[in-house]
Image (cartoon, rainbow, N blue to C red):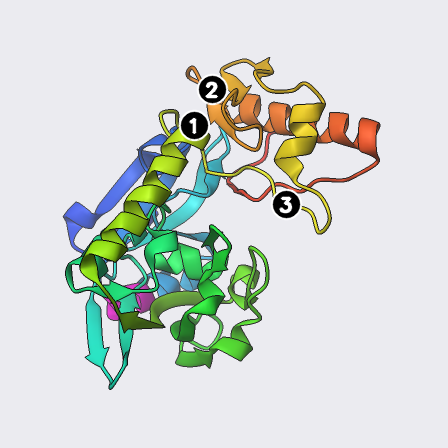
Amino acid sequence: MNSFKKLEEFIPKENIKYNEPMRKHTSFKTGGNADCFIIVKDIDQIKSVINFAKKNNLQLYIIGNGSNTLVLDKGIRGIVLKIDLTEIKIENLENDVIVSVGAGVKIMALAQQLKQKSISGFEEFSGIPGTMGGANRMNAGAYGKELKDIILETKCLNIKTGKIEVLEKEEQKLVYRGSIFKNNNYIILETKIGLQYGNKDEIEEKMNNFLKERKEKQPIEFPSAGSTFKRGENYITAKLIDECGLKGCRIGGAEVSTKHAGFVINKENATAKDILDLIKYVKGKIYEKYNIKIEEEIEIMGEQEE
């Protein structure tokens, strides 16, 4: 760990953790330890950590709220960088509102702030447990709406050049659960979205309805990474899993939710291996019955088992 100590010259000591359990930082609540876990609160700190990692030939991993991530049991060698840029700026136009959102801002908290200011157009996202940076990176969506429907531009740091770039929506190649940012050449710093003023009571009602539906249909009472599998172009993955009789199927502490077949949950102290083995089993059964290769939506991070 001595090689990491030099980080304390440009990052506050309290924002650096060594041999940090990643179960504390992911919604799956499982996985091994990271050699070094750093919370960064400004762009200069991000640049300094990138330079340090390059100079010392260290692997660098970026996380937001860890809500779409499974960390493997052997943990992470290198540095995990948690982006904690939390500024929100609101610009009023005649009828529209432009909101600039730091990558570390939590989606749920943002939705509440926008509601208080009677700003509409974000209600569908109000139950997503991630951060704006993570949501932008994967083009998160809910209830028929995707983030690309409201994104205007994104400020990001090019890891290779060290320069800050502003990418227009079209340049981001936003597709279903994907974007140019998934190639890991950029760190998202701030996302600009276009919204409108609305009626506060109507906004609140919409958000409450979405929350009620989530509670009724999704296993939010258990640790998970949200929807485990991507939907297909002409099929609903959860429906196929349900039709295969896989609801309630368990491996170790991991379970296919009995409430929603598209969710693999950490039912009881699941290891990352339990979760991965169950995902593999489900994929195998779907292929066996339907000849369809389903894909997981979650991101897997860390040192592979030998």
Q: Looking at the image, is mark 2 or mark 3 earlier in the sequence?
A: 3
Dot 1 amino acid type? Pro
10 Å crowding of disc 3: few (<14), some (14-19), many (20+): some
> Which quadrant: the C terminus?
top right
Q: Is residue 115 left or right of residue 66?
A: left
Across and down, in percent, residue 6 comes to 26, 55
The residue labelled by disc 2 is: 270
Dot 3 amino acid type? Arg
Q: Looking at the image, is mark 3 or mark 1 earlier in the sequence?
A: 1
Q: Looking at the image, is mark 1 or mark 2 earlier in the sequence?
A: 1
Give the distance between the C-alpha atoms of the residues marked 1 and 2, in whole angstroms: 16 Å
Q: Residue at x 79, y 39 (%)?
A: 292
Q: Residue at x 26, y 51 (%)?
A: 39
Circle 3 sits in a helix, a strand or a loop, which is it?
loop
Dot 2 amino acid type? Ala
Q: Which mark is residue 219?
A: 1
What range is drawn magenta here?
42-48
Give the distance between the C-alpha atoms of the residues marked 2 and 3, in whole angstroms: 25 Å
Depicted 30 relative to depicted 201: above or below = above
The residue labelled by disc 3 is: 231
Give the distance between the C-alpha atoms of the residues marked 3 and 1, in whole angstroms: 18 Å
